[in-house]
Image: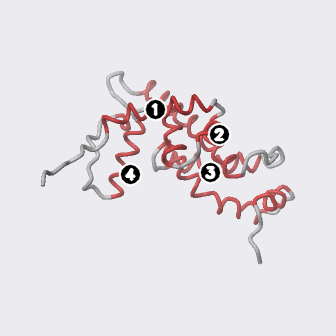
Amino acid sequence: MPTPSDDVLVDRARAGDDAAFARLVDRYESQVAAVIVGMLGNGPEAQDVGQETFVRFYRALDQFRGDASVGTYLTRIAINQALKASKRRQRWYQRFLPRDDAPPDAEPTGNLSDDVDATERQAQVHAALQRIDEKHRAVVVLRILQGYSTRETASMLDVPEGTVMSRLSRALDKLEPLRAPVVTTEV
């Protein structure tokens, strides 16, 4: 039996078919999780935002026109929810931490090195991303980590393509000092 298209699954989900919606969740769960973890890091907050993303998609099924793909639509919801969570986190830190304390994510972690394992490297990349503001982080996550085109990123963030390119350039400039030093050996 052929795999139903997203359009078919959306139509079935609109008609009340919970299994069709579950298939959409299964199909896009890892994509949504990757975007959210890229924005917030891995943890309960990211899980909550992931769940909220699919809840909002479910509630918006009747308004979903299909102008964008389901994956693009979900990614846009995920980015918006992650940005809201990030702002809530910052407000919490501002309210409850003394001014000289920085959020744990903002602490320098040192340079990335080639000899760390993948888990540690992922944690270091996340820590580096947390050191740039949300609008720049969103562009890095979508363009570099998720591989979306400039046009797709612009559409998801609802900004012009030129803004995506300038934000990406600025973000990479800010991340450059955090790169691993290049070790050369003379032969």
Residue hosting label 2: 156
Residue lying at 82% horizontally and 43% vertically, measured from the top left: 63
Residue hosting label 1: 169
Marks 1 and 3 close (CB-CB < 8 Å): no
Q: Secondary structure at mark 2?
A: helix
Q: CA distance from mark 4 to mark 3?
A: 22 Å
Lower sequence index among marks 2 and 1: 2
Q: CA distance from mark 3 to mark 2?
A: 19 Å
Residue hosting label 4: 122
Lower sequence index among marks 1 and 3: 3
Front residue of 8 and 107: 8
Q: Secondary structure at mark 1?
A: helix
Residue lying at 58% horizontally and 29% vertically, measured from the top left: 162
Q: CA distance from mark 4 to mark 2?
A: 24 Å
Q: Secondary structure at mark 4?
A: helix
Mark 2 packing: few (<14 Cα in 10 Å), some, or many (20+)? many
Q: CA distance from mark 1 to mark 3?
A: 32 Å
Lower sequence index among marks 4 and 1: 4
Mark 4 packing: few (<14 Cα in 10 Å), some, or many (20+)? some
